[in-house]
């Protein structure tokens, strides 16, 4: 791969991918720990409620959809720049 392609992909990963992954891991750790973030504790910390699981899955799904759109946009920009450079 050309370095011209690797650099935007690396920047994209640092700016978007790492925060999304870290946010997801933090959210998952809070659910497993039993802390909903609102200060209330669950009576049984080892069990995760179904609504928390659904909320986490929806959050991951939304984050991945946003990431996919951003990657598509950057790919389009890189491809257009390569096409313009070759002409």
Image (tube, helix red, strand yellow):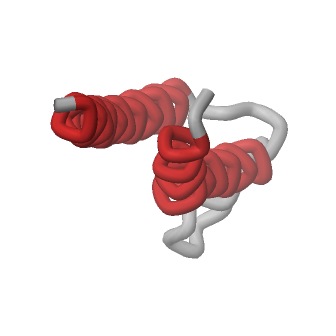
Is 15 placed left or right of 27 in the picture? left
Q: Position of residue 34 (x, y in %)?
A: 71, 52
Residue drawn 34% across the image and 30% down it: 68
Compare residues 80 and 48 and report the one nearer the observer.
80
Coordinates of residue 85 in the picture (x, y in percent):
25, 40
For the N terminus, which image quadrant?
A: top right
Quarter occupied by the C terminus = top left
Q: Going by the picture, which residue comes out furthest to the right?
A: 46
Q: Is residue 19 above or below residue 32?
A: below
Q: Nearer the viewer, residue 21 or 46?
A: 21
The residue drawn where x is 36% and y is 36% is: 71
Tell me if 59 is positioned left or right of 62 in this view. Answer: right
Of residues 56 and 82, the one nearer the viewer is 82
Residue 62 appears in view: no
Instruction: Give the residue at the far front of this rendering.
Output: 87
Q: Residue at x 58, y 67 (%)?
A: 40
87 is higher (above) or lower (below) than 10: above
Q: Left of 16 or right of it: where is 40?
A: right
**Residue at (50%, 61%) from the top-left corner?**
15
Q: Position of residue 77 (x, y in %)?
A: 23, 41
Q: Percent from the top left, x then y, of residue 69?
A: 25, 34
């Amino acid at each position: 791969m050309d370095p011209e392609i690797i650099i935007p992909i690396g920047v994209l990963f640092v700016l978007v991918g790492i925060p999304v992954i870290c946010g997801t891991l933090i959210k998952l750790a809070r659910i497993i720990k039993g802390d909903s973030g609102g200060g209330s504790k669950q009576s049984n910390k080892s069990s995760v409620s179904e609504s928390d699981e659904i909320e986490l899955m929806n959050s991951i799904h939304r984050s991945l959809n946003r990431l996919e759109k951003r990657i598509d946009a950057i790919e389009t920009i890189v491809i257009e720049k390569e096409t313009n450079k070759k002409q």
